[in-house]
Image: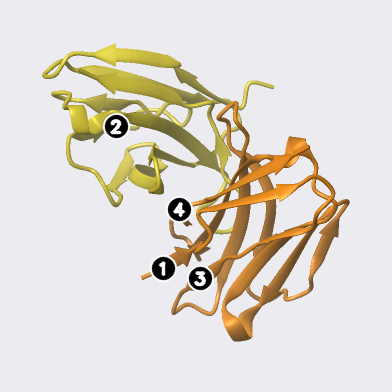
Chain colours: A orange, B yellow
Amino acid sequence: AQKVTQAQTEISVVEKEDVTLDCVYETRDTTYYLFWYKQPPSGELVFLIRRNSFDEQNEISGRYSWNFQKSTSSFNFTITASQVVDSAVYFCALSEEYSTLTFGKGTMLLVSP
Amino acid sequence: NAGVTQTPKFQVLKTGQSMTLQCAQDMNHEYMSWYRQDPGMGLRLIHYSVGAGITDQGEVPNGYNVSRSTTEDFPLRLLSAAPSQTSVYFCASSSRTGATEAFFGQGTRLTVV
């Protein structure tokens, strides 16, 4: 069975701080996919990134970066120089080949000015 | 681009009433699913479909019914609403299970009194 753990329920930072959101996953498959979604206060779910299990390269997109480590079953998300607009709930999710998405419980990020 | 459209956005039901949450997608995606989001619980899968005429249960299917007569539509029926079904409901679609990102509707906030 697949499982995603986001141990941080809520994180509060001040603008311009860097922040890392942790995600630990469990799966028995060798082929699987990891995702991050953002849910701003308006409520919609916004796709951020997808990573497959064969690609351990880290990814950087502007102020966002993702660190995928199979050795520790982690897929952590870092926001550099956080901004108030980054305030949202962030979900990590996992799916095995041809299976459904399993979400973590989410981390609420509050960025204050 | 419509993407995934959910209706209604808000609904209040009395205990015991029935209703249907509508979900339609215009991306010709084979895979569609329904999730519910409750505080501190993340998103939990209710039912999903891998194509027209094919549906299956997710993690929390009790009290809900689905059918998939067309590729575009995937309605979720509450047979006899209960206060425990008060939640935010999201419909999602993707071109393939597992490998591709899911596109989400804007959500339906349901309150059962």
Circle 1 residue? A2
Q: Relative to A47, does residue A60 appear above or below in the rendering? A: below
Label 3: few (<14), some (14–19) or many (≥20) C-alpha neighbours in 10 Å? many
- Residue A54 percent location from the top left of the image: 67, 76
Residue type of the residue flagged with mark 2: Ser
Same chain under badges 3 and 4? The reply is yes
Instruction: Say which residue label 4 marks.
Output: A105
Verify CB contact (< 8 Å) between mark 3 and mark 2: no
Q: CA distance from mark 2 to mark 4?
A: 28 Å
First in residue order: circle 3 vs circle 4: 3
- Does the image show residue B100? no
Q: Nearer the viewer, residue B44 or A108?
A: A108
The residue marked by circle 3 belongs to what chain?
Answer: A
Farthest residue in the right direction?
A62
On the image, the x and y values in percent for residue A22 come to: 60, 65
C-alpha span from label 1 to label 4: 14 Å
Q: Which residue is mark 3?
A: A25
Q: Nearer the viewer, mark 3 or mark 4?
A: 4
Q: Chain of mark 1?
A: A
Q: Residue at x 50, y 41 (%)?
A: B30
Q: Quadrant of residue B111?
A: top left
Closer to us: mark 1 or mark 3? Answer: 3
Q: Residues within 10 Å of mark 1 (few under 14, many from 20)?
A: some
Asked whether disc 3 touches disc 4, contact meaning CB atoms under 8 Å apart, the reply is: no
